Amino acid sequence: MSGRASKTLTIGVISDTHGLLRPEAIQALIGVDHILHAGDVGDPLILDKLRWIAPLTAIRGNVDVSGVCRSLPATYVVELGGRFFYLVHSVHDLDLNPVAAGIAVVVSGHTHRAEVQRRQGVLYLNPGSAGPRRFDLPVTVAKVSVADGDVRARIVKLRVE
């Protein structure tokens, strides 16, 4: 034991903004160390606004078919806090075995349904939708904490009118 307290890394996760970055989402993400956007950005200005909050990693979703958003990667692996995060817009498009690849967290969106599951030691996280409300689903983002290699996620329900 080194006697040093390890720093907890906090990662904000957002998806399916569809051109709408709500002030409540911005407020929920303030103070995070990094932001992941799991696609369906809808407007490149959203990426600029998120970069003002924290470093950003973003992928494209099925609505990102033109302009700057079209040039975003379809999938991406980023290392944060010593753990690998794999971003894919739809979990059905997962093109690797996360366990074999050493992925700690698979981040997806697309369904607008927030969900946190752990399968075979891999955390599967869908932050839900932070953009226009769909169906009767809540408007949500997620926060992930990484400390001493331990990864935990929670859904943050946004209070919107």
Image (cartoon, grey):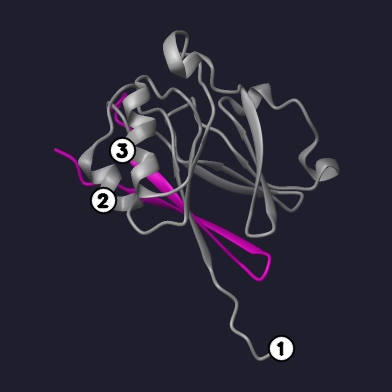
Q: Which residue position is annotated with label 1?
A: 2
Asked if residue 20 is positioned above or below residue 30 in the image, the reply reads above
Quadrant in the picture for residue 113: top left
Task: Classify residue 22 by image quadrant.
Answer: top left
Cα distance in 3D space between marks 2 and 3? 13 Å
Q: Going by the image, does 42 lie left or right of 37?
A: left
SS category of the residue bearing label 3:
loop
* Magenta-colored stretch includes residue 109: no
What residue sits 44% from the left and 8% below the top? 66
Q: Position of residue 53 (x, y in %)?
A: 35, 48
How far apart marks 1 and 3 lie (CA) works out to: 42 Å
Q: Nearer the viewer, residue 21 or 51?
A: 51
Dot 1: few (<14), some (14–19), or many (≥20) neighbours within 10 Å?
Answer: few
| Position of residue 141 measured from the top left corner of the image (x, y, whole percent) | 39, 44
Q: Residue at x 28, y 33 (%)?
A: 21
Magenta extent:
133-161
* Mark 3 Cα shell of 10 Å, populated few (<14), some (14-19), many (≥20): many
Q: Position of residue 128 (x, y in %)?
A: 42, 36
Q: Give, as a three-letter code, the residue at label 2.
A: Gln
The residue under the point 23% across, 45% down is: 24
